[in-house]
Image (tube, rainbow, N blue to C red):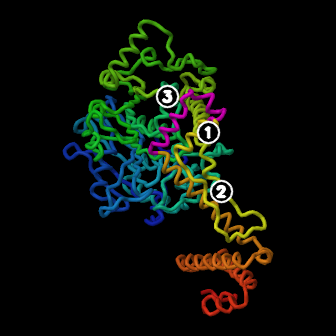
Amino acid sequence: MSRSPSFSAKPELSIKPDPESLKRWIHAFCIMRFDLEQGQLLEECYPPDCLSQEEEIEVSFNSFPDSVSQHHNRSSIHDCIFFFRFRRPKKNTEERDGSDRYLYGYVFNRQRHDERLKRGGEQKSVVILSHTPYSSVFRPLLQIIGPLYFDVGNKAIEHIAGYVSMWPAPVPGKLMELPIGNAMLKVNLPPAHSLPLENGIFYEESASSMAPLLPTNQSVPQGLFHDADLFGIYRGLLLQLWTLWELLLIGEPILIIAPTPPQCSEAVACLVSLVAPLFCSVDFRPYFTIHDPGFARLNSLREGDTFPPMVLGVTNLFFLKALRNIPHVVSVGTPAPNSNRVAFTSRSAGKLSVKPEGLGVQQLSLRRFSPTNLLNAVKLRRDGPLCLMTEHKEAVWTTYSAITKPDTSILNRLIDAGMSPRVEESMSVVNNEILRRHFLELTTNFLAPFGPYFQVNAPSDGSSPYVTPPALPSFGADEFLSNLSARGVGKFLSKRMKSNWPDLYRRFLRGPNFMPWFQRRRAVAEQEQRRLWRLARMKTDMRQITSQMNELEAVDSFNAIEKHISEEVKSRESKGGGGADSEGTFQKLKKDLQAVFSVLPRDMQQLLLLNPQRASLLQDPSELQ
């Protein structure tokens, strides 16, 4: 891997990084070195002292492949990029919130083989740590900073940090242009509804930005890791994608094993991207090692114990024995040439055969019947995932019976480019679009029956915008399933699912993904309803409405407006003052209060004016108290 040719470092134009601005994108840059005597070492961290000792250990163990690549040239360099995710230790015995709970590590690893060096080589990794899963940003950034560091050393880190600190704040769901030297990164960020809450606070999310509405603009990403190579990684398991989609949808524990960290981290990212636009609450680890604190807990689970909902990406075959009771195992990827794992043949694993004009369903792991193939299939099931200890195969081991049927029309649209790497890459882009569009449509239609529970209500014309807005429809799982079974799941899903499709909804409602998504979706709908009613209060002429009010309605409206004024004042005080919008809202509320006051009985008006603060609102329009 080489540095982007469009990038050139200009030390004379060095920019001093601003730590606070840098935090918006990056938590830290780390340089990790593998020492033969001491193991993994943190050699450099910028900004300094921003990691706890536990976090340093986590980053150290996750920043290197489990095994050295088998390149035996006298002097050769092997670069790879992958990423990991780990749960941060509790802060002052308190659980961290939202995006602060996990750190993502994006790794540029270089293995240099040289017989003149001790043990024949050395390893170093450049790591970008961030609270955000912005793989579309940090992968190309690593392609710049990784080779640059090995060219010019530690000053590359501060140089790149200076440019990053000048970037604007990230805007989820938008195309952003981020300058690095004379290069420009043009990246699409994942949408707000796919990201964890920022300290319990919502990003800007609109009611139309989340399922169950199918987006009209397909160029905008609808979930995490929209840039992951879904077709390239799961090319040998395309018929199994619908099973994997269901397993992640209902939150089943999945172990993904691959020969290398780039392959296993990409496989996990692809799987997470399948359930877009659903917010994924399953704990996913793109690259998981035996040194992770969570491994001891998983390793202690006995037969019959329930595994927590998670997706683990691993390369160490030891996990096959240590986690032998995990119910779903997926093996993907191809071992590198000269690897100590035996590469499989297309005959034994059902790899795709070459056909330039397209991929027929008959080619996708559907081997023609023969006694040899039958025996191999029986042996594969009998031996289970432990057969990977001797020979790597692409396969899925699960007892789960999928309800969703593979869509053969989608598979027949996929294109096989043959052996040309350049054409292969461009065709993967096309195939990824086809697959991702299909699973986006599948997930969106699956979530569509929940739409009525997010239906917002705006005030009708001529009605007071100060009455209490109606609550959103209440939700009950049993009632939902009963109504859905009675009316059906819709034409799109009914053609693609078996008759026991209510079981999938039942599992989804019990799984870890439903409630966080549902509660967040409801909160966004409630937020949208409050916005509509606030807008109505600004547009409604209360003088026309008050003429039709009886005394009780007028009193209720007066109290409601007074409450809104109090909330507006508190909001202004908490923000240290208000802008033009806040001032306009406040003045409109005062006018509405005066309009309602004018129709109240005289004796009630006099009683209300005994309160000096209220009297100032009713008599002096310039006073703000």
Q: Earlier in the sequence, mark 1 or mark 3?
A: 3
Q: In this view, does 55 lie to the left or right of 175?
A: left
Q: Mark 1 points at which residue?
A: 445
Q: In this view, does 331 lie to the left or right of 499?
A: left
Looking at the image, which is closer to me, 575 or 231? 575
Residue at image coords 53%, 60%: 202
Residue at image coords 42%, 29%: 332
Q: Kindly identify which numbered label has been placed on residue 402.
A: 3
Looking at the image, which is closer to me, 227 or 498? 498
Name, please, the residue furthest toward the top. 371
Residue 74 visible? The answer is yes
Q: In this view, does 459 lie above or below 183?
A: below
Residue 67 on image: x %, y %: 30, 34
Q: What stretch is highlighted in magenta?
A: 488-512
Give the spatial CA distance, label 3 vs label 2.
35 Å
Residue 3 on image: x %, y %: 48, 44
Residue 499 within the magenta-colored segment of the rendering:
yes
Binning the other alpha carbons within 10 Å of mark 1 as few (below 14), some (14 to 19) or many (20 upward) gives many
